Every structure is written in structure tokens, then in C-alpha cells.
């Protein structure tokens, strides 16, 4: 089945130690998104890619970066994780037109 | 500002009864979709139902239906014959500009047996 896959499901990292979360898709969707979701809150958009065009939200901290080497893969890099970065990170994809979005299962990041 | 608002942080309903979750949004887009997502404790975001804004007919998916009032920018979700498995966080969402999906604050739905 076509899907969005996030690895790992759970990630523990040390305070200040760089960490990378990965997302892959078999849907061949043009647009890929990274959301941050803290406990009992709505998902908050960090970035999205339209093909290779990178779009950063104005309030996304500089500590967060993203890479999309090809259509299928997208990575979220956190350069120096702080305790406040502990959250669920959701990857999603869509086709142009906004009619359908598919989410991965998420990666729960713990910072110790 | 383009926003999505859910005014009910928590709702509860007796099993087999009907519940309605509210959502309002504000957008300058002329053609758009609206979504309701369910997020159980496993945290997987699951699409419940989708409404195309240019369609006047309200979307229906089995026990789930919407009441879409475009002029009022209102998009409520009705769950009929509630089941224990419906218990979850429900998020209203809309793509508000440049492919960006924006979520409301969520409503935690509890089903009482």
C-alpha cells in the first residue's frame, strides 16, 4: 500500500546533540510537510516542500532545518535539541490542490 | 489572519447517541477543502471526512457527516451512533494558503458506555 513512513517511531537524544528524523513516501506526492505536535496541542507546521522548493514558516526556530534529496525522502534536522523540542513530529504529503493529505505515524522525540 | 478555531476543548457522549463537534475558520481562499481528522492515543492522524468548499452538498461517510456553512465559515462534524472506538482527539483542518494545512486546537471526545 502507498504510504508515508517515519523512522524511527521513538527517538531519544541528548540535550544539544544533533538528531535527524526521516520520512519517506511511496505516493509520489509533490508536497511534503513537517509538523511539530506537543502534548494536547494542535500540530504546528514547521516547513513544507513543493517539489524542491523549500518553504519555512516564519516562527520556525533556526535550530530546525530540513532536507529533501528526492521526491520520496524528507529529513528533519534538529541541530541542538533543547528540552522544549520534545514532541511528536509528524510528516505528511499531499498533491497540489490541497485535496488530500496523508500522514505518517510520527516520531516521538524525547530529549534527556 | 487565516485561522481554524475549535471552541470545544472536550466533549462527551453516551454510546449510541449523536454528538456534534464545532469548527470555524477564516480564509481568503476562494476554492479550498476542509477536513476532520481523528487522532487516537497512538497519535496516527486519520482522515475522517473531507468537504470541498465549492460543493453545497454536505459530505457524508457512514456515521460521520458535516454541516458546512460557507457564508458563516462553519464546518461542524456530526457523529451518529457513537461507538467506543470513536474516542479520540478530533482536529478540524483547512489548507489556508500555499498548500499549508492548518489545524484547530482540537476537541477531545469521550464516549461513555
Image (tube, grey):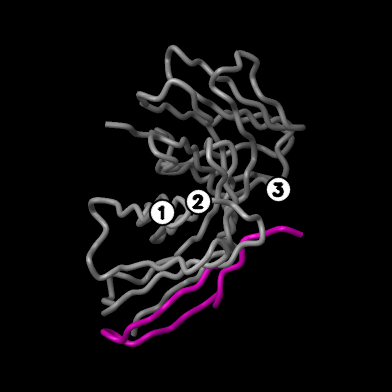
Q: Earlier in the sequence, mark 2 or mark 1?
A: 2
Q: Horizontally, is A111 left or right of B1 in the view?
A: right
Circle 2 Cα neighbour tier, 10 Å, few/some/many (<14 / 14–19 / ≥20): many
> What residue is at 49 percent from the left and 37 percent from the top?
B92
Query: Looking at the image, is B51 positioned above or below residue A10?
Result: above
Which residue is tagged 2?
A: A31
Q: Horizontally, is B89 left or right of A57 in the view?
A: right
> What residue is at 73 percent from the left and 43 percent from the top?
B83
CB within 8 Å, label 1 to label 3 = no
Q: In the image, which disc is placed on residue A48?
A: 1
Q: Between tags 3 and 2, which lies in front?
A: 2
Q: CA distance from mark 1 to mark 3?
A: 35 Å
Residue extent of the magenta highlight: A1-23
Circle 1 Cα neighbour tier, 10 Å, few/some/many (<14 / 14–19 / ≥20): many
Which residue is tagged 3?
A: B84
Q: CA distance from mark 2 to mark 1?
A: 7 Å
> What residue is at 59 percent from the left and 27 percent from the top?
B51
The chain holding disc 3 is: B
Query: Looking at the image, is A37 positioned above or below residue A73?
Result: above
Circle 3 Cα neighbour tier, 10 Å, few/some/many (<14 / 14–19 / ≥20): some
Please state the total of marks drawn on the protein image: 3
CB within 8 Å, label 2 to label 1 = yes
- Can you give x and y, in whole percent of width and height, for residue B21 in the image? 53, 31
Q: Quadrant of the C terminus of chain A?
A: bottom left
- Same chain for the residues under marks 1 and 3 in the image: no
Q: In the image, which disc is placed on residue B24?
A: none
Secondary structure category for the residue under label 2:
strand
Q: Quadrant of residue B24?
A: top left
- Same chain for the residues under marks 3 and 2 in the image: no
The chain holding disc 2 is: A
- Can you give x and y, in whole percent of width and height, for residue A2 in the image? 71, 58
Amino acid at each position: 500500500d502507498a504510504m508515508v513512513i517515519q523512522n524511527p517511531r521513538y527517538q531519544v537524544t541528548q540535550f544539544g546533540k544533533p538528531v535527524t528524523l526521516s520520512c519517506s513516501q511511496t505516493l509520489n506526492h509533490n508536497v511534503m510537510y513537517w509538523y511539530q505536535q506537543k502534548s494536547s496541542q494542535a500540530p504546528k507546521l514547521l516547513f513544507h516542500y513543493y517539489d524542491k522548493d523549500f518553504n519555512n514558516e516564519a516562527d520556525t526556530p533556526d535550530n530546525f532545518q530540513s532536507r529533501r534529496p528526492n521526491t520520496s525522502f524528507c529529513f528533519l534536522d534538529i541541530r541542538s535539541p533543547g528540552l522544549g523540542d520534545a514532541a511528536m513530529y509528524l510528516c505528511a504529503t499531499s498533491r497540489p490542490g490541497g485535496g488530500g493529505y496523508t500522514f505518517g505515524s510520527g516520531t516521538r522525540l524525547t530529549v534527556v | 489572519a487565516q485561522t481554524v478555531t475549535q471552541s470545544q476543548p472536550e466533549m462527551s457522549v453516551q454510546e449510541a447517541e449523536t454528538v456534534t463537534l464545532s469548527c470555524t475558520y477564516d480564509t481568503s481562499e476562494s476554492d479550498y477543502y476542509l477536513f476532520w481528522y481523528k487522532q487516537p492515543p497512538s497519535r496516527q492522524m486519520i482522515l475522517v471526512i473531507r468537504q470541498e468548499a465549492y460543493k453545497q452538498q454536505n459530505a457524508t461517510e457512514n456515521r460521520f457527516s458535516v454541516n458546512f456553512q460557507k457564508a458563516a465559515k462553519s464546518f461542524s462534524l456530526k457523529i451518529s451512533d457513537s461507538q467506543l472506538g470513536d474516542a479520540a482527539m478530533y482536529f478540524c483542518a483547512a489548507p489556508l494558503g500555499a498548500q499549508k494545512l492548518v489545524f484547530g486546537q482540537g476537541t477531545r471526545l469521550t464516549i461513555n458506555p
